[in-house]
Amino acid sequence: MSHKKPLSLNTFFPFLLWLKDYNRGDLLKDFSAGLTVSIILIPQVMAFSILAGLPAVYGLYAAFLGTAVSALWGSSKHLSTGPAALVSFLILTALIPLAKPGTPEYIALAIVLAFMIGVIQLLMGIFRVGFVMNFISHSVIAGFTTAAALIIAITQIPSLFDFTVDHHEFVFLNIYEVVSALPKTNLVSLTIGLMSAIAIIISKRKFSKAFPSALIVMIAGTLASYFLNFESYGVSVIGAVDADLSLPTIPNLSFGKVLALLPSGLIIGVLGFVQGYAITKSITSKSKQKIDVNQELIGQGLGNIASSVFKGFPIAGSFSRTAVNYSAGAVSGVSSAFVSLLVLITILFLTPLFHYLPNAVLSAVVIASLVELIEFSKFRETFNLSGTDGIVITATFLFSFILKPDFAIFIGIVMSLVLFLRRTIVADVIELVFVMEEERFQEITFGNEIRLFPNILILRV
């Protein structure tokens, strides 16, 4: 006899479960955490929007409603969702074959992609298939994440050095474009970008994660650009930011182009969630909170749909902002609601202040955020634990440079599943014998086949 949980308001509005015990003290803690996270988030999401091939303001659109919805409908108290470096990079690689970055068609495709990913994640949560995430090897994620961090750094060189290049699907073609354009480097812009990146990286090591180094660098860069007239030295700036919260119109896209987004939507949806879920698990090891993987899928799915409604692009969990949210004392998803409120204030009143912000500073923000994504130490650890997993992490890393990055993820997942099934179906069963002289077990071979306990068979699988 099955016992189905009856439908109630809590089914559709899970945050009602913890809101009934919410008090003024919790509200103050969440406001403080939300304020701290928003100071970190605002410069990051603008930079990640540029990384995704979109105008900077679209990062604010994505963070406005998606951040709050993901938190309130998810199961984690601390996960901070919004534009993230890895997902923004995958958006760029997915859309480059279909439209030129920054064009109205490209923006429309990014919005449609967010909606598509949201629907995929929502359906996965509703049909309770979150267990599938357990079959995606950490080796695939680690290999791709490290490769993606290096590739993202390459994509930021044009903005850092202040020249323009054509974008391509394949990394080696982008590297060729960048190297060919190096003689066009603007030394003033390069100096600004390098100083900004170094300042952010050093401050991250010397101060807590909550220290708003990126925001300080952005403010300093904007003021210096205004008073020293950086534009007269050929330094590119963001320029006029036309921010509004009007709902997007239904994009006039061909069915073929929308259909072409589906494979990328599946990959980004799964990878974005796996990234966020891994972050959540690392935090819950400290907070001891129980996480419902299917509810988290529903939260992330609704967050992406909400992002698309307000002209945003795909979003995912952020490790740095989640860590700040936890350390700042957040007690619930209300902290993310406060983040959304502060993003709204920024959109409505503060965007004109970004006019003179050098593009090189935003590239510096992206590059500084990549430090935590590069995990070469994981390669050695993985090989030490399992040779097959070591092959997977290395293959995923290398394929990310040779093939399209999203295809490299697919190959890595297939490899990990095949090797997992091989280990499961064709397991190596070895009989062991206890060697008295050495007081240890070893594989039975000719010469040591005398068993100490004839009635007991000792096997290693």
Image (cartoon, rainbow, N blue to C red):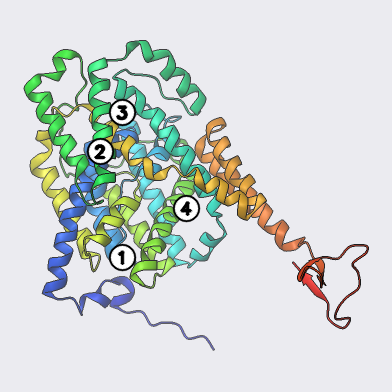
Front of the two marks 3 and 2: 2
For marks 3 and 2, the one nearer the N-term is 3
Q: Which residue is mark 2?
A: 200
Measure the alpha-carbon separation of dots 3 and 4. Answer: 27 Å
- Mark 3, Cα crowd under 10 Å, few <14 / some 14-19 / many 20+, is few
Residue to which mark 3 is pinned:
103
Which residue appears farthest toward the bottom when viewing the image?
A: 1
Q: Nearer the viewer, residue 286 or 343?
A: 286
Whether residue 353 is situated above or below residue 31 in the rendered picture: above
Please report the residue visible at 91 percent of the width from the left and 73 percent of the height from the top: 450
Which residue sits furthest top?
A: 183
Q: Please say whether residue 277 is visible from this viewpoint.
A: yes
3D distance between C-alphas at marks 1 and 3: 33 Å
Q: Nearer the viewer, residue 30 or 285?
A: 285
Pointers 1 and 4 in contact (C-beta within 8 Å): no
Q: Residue at x 38, y 14 (%)?
A: 181
Q: Which mark identifies residue 73? A: 1
Which x, y percent locates residue 455?
A: 87, 83
